[in-house]
Amino acid sequence: QSVLTQPPSASGTPGQRVTISCSGSSSNIGSNYVYWYQQLPGTAPKLLIYRNNQRPSGVPDRFSGSKSGTSASLAISGLRSEDEADYYCAAWDDSLSGARVFGGGTKLTVL
Amino acid sequence: QVQLVQSGAEVKKPGASVKVSCKASGYTFTSYDINWVRQATGQGLEWMGWMNPNSGNTGYAQKFQGRVTMTRNTSISTAYMELSSLRSEDTAVYYCARDFGDLDYWGQGTLVTVSS
Protein backbone atom coordinates (compact mmCIF):
# COMPACT_ATOMS: atom_id res chain seq x y z
CA GLN A 1 0.00 0.00 0.00
CA SER A 2 1.72 3.16 -1.22
CA VAL A 3 1.54 6.42 0.72
CA LEU A 4 0.79 8.31 -2.51
CA THR A 5 -2.14 7.06 -4.58
CA GLN A 6 -2.01 6.81 -8.37
CA PRO A 7 -4.32 5.05 -10.82
CA PRO A 8 -2.73 1.76 -11.85
CA SER A 9 -3.27 2.40 -15.54
CA ALA A 10 -3.96 5.11 -18.10
CA SER A 11 -4.21 5.10 -21.86
CA GLY A 12 -4.52 7.35 -24.87
CA THR A 13 -4.09 7.46 -28.61
CA PRO A 14 -1.25 9.24 -30.40
CA GLY A 15 -1.69 13.00 -30.30
CA GLN A 16 -4.05 12.93 -27.34
CA ARG A 17 -3.56 14.58 -23.96
CA VAL A 18 -3.57 12.36 -20.90
CA THR A 19 -3.28 13.17 -17.23
CA ILE A 20 -2.10 11.03 -14.34
CA SER A 21 -3.16 11.93 -10.82
CA CYS A 22 -1.29 11.53 -7.54
CA SER A 23 -3.11 11.91 -4.24
CA GLY A 24 -1.42 12.35 -0.87
CA SER A 25 -1.89 14.15 2.42
CA SER A 26 -0.89 17.28 4.29
CA SER A 27 2.34 15.67 5.49
CA ASN A 28 3.66 14.91 2.02
CA ILE A 29 2.20 16.58 -1.09
CA GLY A 30 0.48 19.23 1.01
CA SER A 31 3.74 20.54 2.42
CA ASN A 32 6.50 19.42 0.07
CA TYR A 33 7.48 19.42 -3.58
CA VAL A 34 6.22 16.72 -5.93
CA TYR A 35 8.49 14.90 -8.36
CA TRP A 36 7.62 12.68 -11.31
CA TYR A 37 9.69 9.86 -12.75
CA GLN A 38 9.33 7.96 -16.02
CA GLN A 39 10.44 4.34 -16.21
CA LEU A 40 10.69 2.76 -19.64
CA PRO A 41 10.56 -1.04 -19.73
CA GLY A 42 13.75 -2.62 -18.42
CA THR A 43 15.44 0.65 -17.53
CA ALA A 44 16.11 2.76 -14.47
CA PRO A 45 13.68 5.55 -13.61
CA LYS A 46 14.34 8.96 -15.13
CA LEU A 47 13.51 12.33 -13.56
CA LEU A 48 10.68 13.93 -15.52
CA ILE A 49 9.38 16.78 -13.34
CA TYR A 50 10.92 18.35 -10.23
CA ARG A 51 9.60 20.91 -7.74
CA ASN A 52 5.98 20.36 -8.84
CA ASN A 53 6.25 21.75 -12.35
CA GLN A 54 9.88 22.15 -13.46
CA ARG A 55 11.34 20.16 -16.34
CA PRO A 56 14.99 19.09 -16.40
CA SER A 57 16.82 20.01 -19.56
CA GLY A 58 16.08 17.54 -22.30
CA VAL A 59 12.54 16.75 -21.17
CA PRO A 60 10.07 17.86 -23.86
CA ASP A 61 7.56 20.56 -22.98
CA ARG A 62 4.82 18.04 -23.79
CA PHE A 63 5.27 16.97 -20.18
CA SER A 64 3.93 19.25 -17.46
CA GLY A 65 3.27 18.97 -13.75
CA SER A 66 0.92 20.73 -11.39
CA LYS A 67 -0.01 20.61 -7.73
CA SER A 68 -3.03 21.74 -5.77
CA GLY A 69 -3.44 21.11 -2.07
CA THR A 70 -2.71 17.46 -1.37
CA SER A 71 -2.91 16.30 -5.00
CA ALA A 72 -0.71 16.57 -8.05
CA SER A 73 -1.01 15.75 -11.72
CA LEU A 74 1.23 14.92 -14.62
CA ALA A 75 -0.04 15.89 -18.06
CA ILE A 76 1.31 14.57 -21.32
CA SER A 77 0.16 16.31 -24.47
CA GLY A 78 0.71 15.21 -28.05
CA LEU A 79 1.01 11.62 -26.88
CA ARG A 80 3.64 9.55 -28.69
CA SER A 81 4.30 5.82 -28.76
CA GLU A 82 7.60 6.29 -26.95
CA ASP A 83 5.71 7.72 -23.97
CA GLU A 84 4.49 4.23 -23.13
CA ALA A 85 6.05 3.65 -19.72
CA ASP A 86 5.43 3.55 -15.99
CA TYR A 87 5.11 6.90 -14.24
CA TYR A 88 5.72 7.49 -10.54
CA CYS A 89 5.05 10.48 -8.35
CA ALA A 90 7.16 11.11 -5.25
CA ALA A 91 7.43 13.51 -2.35
CA TRP A 92 9.03 13.84 1.05
CA ASP A 93 6.80 12.94 3.99
CA ASP A 94 7.26 14.93 7.18
CA SER A 95 5.35 12.43 9.31
CA LEU A 96 7.75 9.57 8.67
CA SER A 97 10.90 11.09 10.20
CA GLY A 98 11.84 12.52 6.84
CA ALA A 99 11.12 9.75 4.37
CA ARG A 100 10.79 9.91 0.61
CA VAL A 101 7.54 8.29 -0.52
CA PHE A 102 6.48 7.08 -3.96
CA GLY A 103 3.15 6.46 -5.58
CA GLY A 104 2.36 2.96 -6.72
CA GLY A 105 2.97 3.86 -10.34
CA THR A 106 0.77 4.28 -13.38
CA LYS A 107 1.29 2.20 -16.49
CA LEU A 108 0.60 4.36 -19.54
CA THR A 109 -0.43 2.55 -22.69
CA VAL A 110 -0.43 4.30 -26.06
CA LEU A 111 -3.16 2.65 -28.10
CA GLN B 1 28.97 13.37 -17.63
CA VAL B 2 27.43 12.18 -14.40
CA GLN B 3 27.38 8.40 -14.05
CA LEU B 4 26.48 5.99 -11.29
CA VAL B 5 27.71 2.46 -12.00
CA GLN B 6 26.52 -0.33 -9.76
CA SER B 7 27.95 -3.75 -8.99
CA GLY B 8 26.67 -6.90 -10.64
CA ALA B 9 23.82 -9.23 -9.85
CA GLU B 10 23.88 -11.27 -6.65
CA VAL B 11 22.26 -14.52 -5.54
CA LYS B 12 21.97 -15.00 -1.79
CA LYS B 13 20.44 -17.53 0.57
CA PRO B 14 17.84 -16.53 3.13
CA GLY B 15 19.47 -15.12 6.25
CA ALA B 16 22.57 -13.91 4.42
CA SER B 17 23.64 -10.33 3.74
CA VAL B 18 24.31 -8.51 0.49
CA LYS B 19 26.42 -5.43 -0.18
CA VAL B 20 25.79 -3.43 -3.35
CA SER B 21 28.20 -0.75 -4.56
CA CYS B 22 27.55 2.42 -6.52
CA LYS B 23 30.55 4.18 -8.09
CA ALA B 24 30.03 7.84 -8.95
CA SER B 25 31.85 9.83 -11.62
CA GLY B 26 31.48 13.12 -13.43
CA TYR B 27 30.78 15.23 -10.33
CA THR B 28 32.07 15.86 -6.82
CA PHE B 29 30.96 12.75 -4.93
CA THR B 30 30.80 14.47 -1.54
CA SER B 31 28.50 17.27 -2.74
CA TYR B 32 25.28 15.27 -3.13
CA ASP B 33 23.47 12.69 -1.02
CA ILE B 34 23.00 9.19 -2.38
CA ASN B 35 19.60 7.51 -2.05
CA TRP B 36 18.79 3.83 -2.42
CA VAL B 37 15.52 2.67 -3.98
CA ARG B 38 14.42 -0.88 -4.71
CA GLN B 39 11.88 -2.44 -7.03
CA ALA B 40 10.54 -5.96 -6.84
CA THR B 41 9.64 -7.59 -10.15
CA GLY B 42 6.47 -6.06 -11.52
CA GLN B 43 6.14 -3.77 -8.50
CA GLY B 44 6.62 -0.09 -7.75
CA LEU B 45 9.53 1.89 -6.37
CA GLU B 46 10.34 1.63 -2.67
CA TRP B 47 12.63 4.13 -0.98
CA MET B 48 15.18 2.65 1.42
CA GLY B 49 17.16 5.62 2.71
CA TRP B 50 19.83 8.24 2.12
CA MET B 51 23.47 8.84 2.91
CA ASN B 52 25.52 12.02 2.94
CA PRO B 53 28.91 11.07 1.45
CA ASN B 54 30.61 14.05 3.05
CA SER B 55 29.59 13.42 6.68
CA GLY B 56 28.56 9.79 6.48
CA ASN B 57 25.21 10.69 8.03
CA THR B 58 22.36 8.42 7.08
CA GLY B 59 18.58 8.21 7.25
CA TYR B 60 16.71 4.97 6.74
CA ALA B 61 13.09 4.15 6.00
CA GLN B 62 11.40 2.71 9.08
CA LYS B 63 10.81 -0.57 7.27
CA PHE B 64 14.54 -1.19 6.90
CA GLN B 65 15.79 0.17 10.24
CA GLY B 66 18.13 -2.35 11.84
CA ARG B 67 18.66 -4.30 8.61
CA VAL B 68 20.21 -1.75 6.25
CA THR B 69 23.54 0.04 6.45
CA MET B 70 24.66 2.71 4.00
CA THR B 71 28.34 3.62 3.88
CA ARG B 72 30.86 5.17 1.54
CA ASN B 73 34.49 5.30 0.54
CA THR B 74 35.23 8.84 -0.55
CA SER B 75 38.69 7.96 -1.89
CA ILE B 76 37.06 5.94 -4.67
CA SER B 77 33.76 7.88 -4.90
CA THR B 78 31.74 4.81 -4.07
CA ALA B 79 28.62 4.33 -1.97
CA TYR B 80 27.50 1.03 -0.50
CA MET B 81 24.21 -0.41 0.66
CA GLU B 82 24.26 -3.52 2.81
CA LEU B 83 21.06 -5.37 3.63
CA SER B 84 21.15 -8.17 6.19
CA SER B 85 18.87 -11.04 7.27
CA LEU B 86 17.72 -11.44 3.69
CA ARG B 87 14.38 -13.10 2.97
CA SER B 88 12.65 -13.99 -0.28
CA GLU B 89 10.69 -10.73 -0.22
CA ASP B 90 13.98 -8.84 -0.60
CA THR B 91 14.38 -10.17 -4.14
CA ALA B 92 14.42 -6.98 -6.19
CA VAL B 93 16.43 -4.60 -8.33
CA TYR B 94 18.28 -2.13 -6.11
CA TYR B 95 19.07 1.34 -7.47
CA CYS B 96 21.31 4.10 -6.20
CA ALA B 97 20.44 7.65 -7.18
CA ARG B 98 22.02 11.07 -6.73
CA ASP B 99 19.91 13.34 -4.55
CA PHE B 100 19.68 16.95 -5.65
CA GLY B 101 16.34 17.45 -3.92
CA ASP B 102 15.09 15.29 -6.72
CA LEU B 103 16.77 12.04 -7.80
CA ASP B 104 18.38 13.35 -10.94
CA TYR B 105 20.77 10.54 -11.87
CA TRP B 106 20.27 6.83 -11.29
CA GLY B 107 22.48 3.77 -11.42
CA GLN B 108 21.62 0.96 -13.80
CA GLY B 109 20.29 -1.23 -10.99
CA THR B 110 21.53 -4.40 -9.31
CA LEU B 111 19.37 -7.52 -9.20
CA VAL B 112 19.52 -9.27 -5.85
CA THR B 113 17.89 -12.69 -5.79
CA VAL B 114 17.22 -14.38 -2.45
CA SER B 115 16.64 -18.09 -2.87
CA SER B 116 17.40 -21.27 -1.00
Image (cartoon, rainbow, N blue to C red):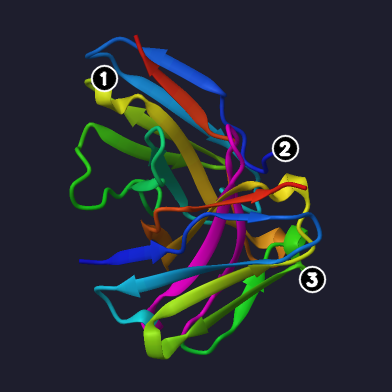
Look at mark 3 in the image and give the residue it sits on: B66
The kind of residue on which mark 2 rests is Gln
From the top left corner, tell me how far across and down residue B63 is, in percent. Answer: 76, 58
Which chain does the residue under circle 3 lie in? B
Mark 2 vs mark 3: tell me if same chain: no
User: Image height check: is A75 above or below B57?
Assistant: above
CB contact under 8 Å: marks 2 and 3 = no
The kind of residue on which mark 1 rests is Ser
Viewer can see residue B100: no
User: Image height check: is A93 above or below B17?
Assistant: above
Which chain does the residue under circle 1 lie in? A
| Label 1 neighbour load within 10 Å: few <14, some 14-19, many 20+ | few
Q: Is residue A78 magenta?
A: no
From the top left corner, tell me how far across and down residue A58 is, in percent. Answer: 18, 47
From the top left corner, tell me how far across and down residue B49 is, in percent. Answer: 61, 65
Mark 2 vs mark 1: tell me if same chain: yes
From the top left corner, tell me how far across and down residue B31 is, in percent. Answer: 37, 81
Which chain does the residue under circle 2 lie in? A
Q: Quadrant of residue B3?
A: bottom left
Q: Which residues are magenta?
A: B30-53
Identify the mark nearer the N-term, 2 or 1.
2
**In this rendering, position of residue B3 left or right of residue B32:** left
Viewer can see residue B27: yes
Look at mark 2 in the image and give the residue it sits on: A1
The kind of residue on which mark 3 rests is Gly
Secondary element type, mark 3: loop
Look at mark 1 in the image and give the residue it sits on: A81
Mark 1 vs mark 3: tell me if same chain: no
Secondary element type, mark 2: loop
Separation of residues labelled 2 and 1 (CA atoms): 30 Å
CB contact under 8 Å: marks 1 and 3 = no
